Amino acid sequence: MGLKQAFWSVPAKAGEPDLWVCMSCLNEAFCQKVPMPDCPMCHGVSTYEAFSLAAVQDWGTEDLIAKAVAAQRAEEALRAAAQATPPMESVQ
């Protein structure tokens, strides 16, 4: 059975870049989080830099750009689902 990847949350403020790219392999992108303990592709540690999607599109490979777009879409879907979920009521 495979291990589930753990992540550190890296929230972005409005106007700040929200994509984190592994600078060791330039092949992994994550949105508002970084994997721990290391990059799942190259196993680099503490090698992430923040970028906007526009910046990644300027210099990234097609594969990296696709991963960045997918990461942002997944984060947006999580946010939308969290907002759509009604708060739980406590039963006393």
Image (cartoon, rainbow, N blue to C red):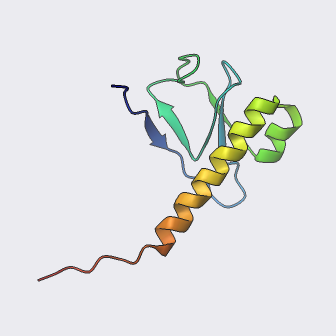
Which residue extends farthest right? 58
At x 50%, y 72%, the residue is 83
Residue 14 at what x, y percent from top left?
67, 61
Q: Nearer the viewer, residue 15 or 62?
A: 62
User: Image point 45% across, 38% down: which residue?
Assistant: 7
Vertical arrangement, residue 26 with respect to residue 66, above or below: above
User: Going by the image, does 9 lie left or right of 74?
Assistant: left
Q: Is residue 21 left or right of residue 59?
A: left
Q: Which residue sits at x=61%, y=59%?
A: 76
Relative image position of residue 91 (x, y in whole percent): 16, 81
Q: In x, y percent, where is residue 81?
A: 50, 66
- Occupied quadrant, residue 92: bottom left
Q: Residue at x 67, y 19 (%)?
A: 25
Q: Could you say where residue 65 lies in the image, as x and y percent from the top left?
A: 77, 37
Against 36, residue 16 (above or below) is below
Report whether 48 appears left or right of 10.
right
